[in-house]
Image: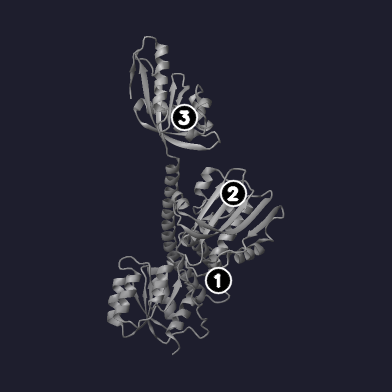
Amino acid sequence: MEQKLVEGKQGEGRLQATSYLNGVFRHISAPIIAWNREQRIVIFNEASVRMSGHAEAEVLGQPLEGLFPAEDRSHALQRIESATRKGELVEIPILRRDGSVRVGLWNTSPIYDADDGPAIITVATGQDITERKKLDAQLIHTQKMEAIGILAGGIAHDFNNVLQGISGYAQLLLMRKPPDDPDRDYLARMEELIQVATRLIGQLLIFSRKAEKKIRPLDLNREVTKVMKSLIRIIPRTISVETRLSDDLRGINMDQEQVEAVLMNLVANAIDAMPDGGRLVVETKNTTLDERYCKDHVGTTPGRYVLLTVSDSGCGMDREMLEHIFEPFYTTREVSQGTGLGLAIVYGVIKDCHGYITCSSEPGQGAVFNVYFPVLGNVGKNEDRPAEREKTATAHGCNETILVVDDESPILDIACDILDQYGYATLTAENGEDALQIYKRERDRIDLVILDIGMPGMGGYQCFKELQKIDPAIKIIITTGYYASKRIGEMLEAGAAGFIGKPYRLVDMVKKVRDILGDR
């Protein structure tokens, strides 16, 4: 907006213009701030007072930069000048009287006098976008974590296939080496490292919410008591520990091992934050998230929750750290002191149960983690299954024929090698389409199918359904490195004879085969 003010006396005209504008702007609902050539505030309407918490008398005549946070003052003035010149909107934070910050989106307009010189007044009309920015940031963070989870799950699936190949070849070599062969020690060490890698991938699967889990009703107070009892010996004496457990705590529906992982990782994180000692508090209580809270917090659902709070008086975290703490492999520790998967596991577990987790912290002020578990009845049915019975009989076959379906040729080679050693005949298919053709042709002599779920093309799940159409009595062992528990559960309920996750020990696989085929 440009306005020419033609006055007989320049100073008097400016005062009259300012007085006129102040009267016009005073009761407008949008925040309006105006400043003169010396960048001193001359107009500060009622909406600006509400946004900033400053009284009009406190700011009139004061430098404009006093409204901005100290760390942003010089940049804010530069952005305002640039936006005014270009006619663009500009985001500028306003420092409230209580020390908090509100973000405004401002449109700046110069007002000129008759001399065509610099603007006598610059008027900024804004809107408070603080809550919108907060919600946008939450949404972006949620989308980022979802994308990272999908990526982690995909990597875990592919890497488990690689591990299965490496582990399988190592196991085959071990079987063929005589007891006194010096290479056996190296192969055994390879197997140990493979198990370490397997556990690491298992943690990634928890984060990506693709880990197999056993859901059942749990008393969170009991789990807290058990975990704290097991950790008490490793908590330094310089740290005082306090537990505050609600007497009437509601039940939750969770995997016990995953709840323990949440507790242990949060407590371990708190201990690491207090190398010189401090105070650790673990608290449980019932709470309810209402519509208003959920509207302001992306990813939450209204309802009843059990709240677990783990707080410490440690070193705290800055804003940048808070933005990344739940990402896998993000850590502030030394390279040799951890993988950075602890809080990522916590995040994955909580999201998978439709819960919610927050963290508040400032440098030197400790940290507070709040974990909201949906109460019993808000989540899915119990997916716990009886443990497989241990097969004590010999795993050797009686020349039964097994069709092995997998898109990874090393896994096919290894599976056929070990099954052949144990007296089974084998057929192989590298995809679902080939598996169907082979089964239609050879169904009279195929006794069992070992089927990978995660294959390209038709895919294992569709192949499973088509095989059942051909032969409703077919025996199928499903296998995958992805651990998509919902799909595994569906296939087991639909008639799959068993499941074995990659990477598996070859002897476990042949035992499962013998168990399903039965004694002959």
Does 379 sit above or below residue 34?
below
Measured as percent of width and height from the top left, residue 297 is found at 46, 50
Q: Where is the C terminus found, in terms of image quarters?
A: bottom left
Asked if disc 1 and disc 2 are in contact, CB closer than 8 Å, the reply is no
Measured as percent of width and height from the top left, residue 152 is found at 44, 58
C-alpha separation, residue under disc 3 versus residue under disc 1:
66 Å
Say what secondary structure mark 3 lies in: helix
Please give the residue where the numbered disc 1 appears in the rendered image.
184
Q: Amino acid at mark 1?
A: Arg
Q: Amino acid at mark 2?
A: Ala
Say what secondary structure mark 1 lies in: helix
Indicate which label's residue lies in the foreground, 1 or 2: 2
Q: Residue at x 42, y 20 (%)?
A: 19
Measured as percent of width and height from the top left, residue 29 is found at 40, 34
Q: Residue at x 34, y 28 (%)?
A: 87
Mark 2: few, some, or many residues within 10 Å (few <14, many ≥20)?
many
Mark 3: few, some, or many residues within 10 Å (few <14, many ≥20)?
few
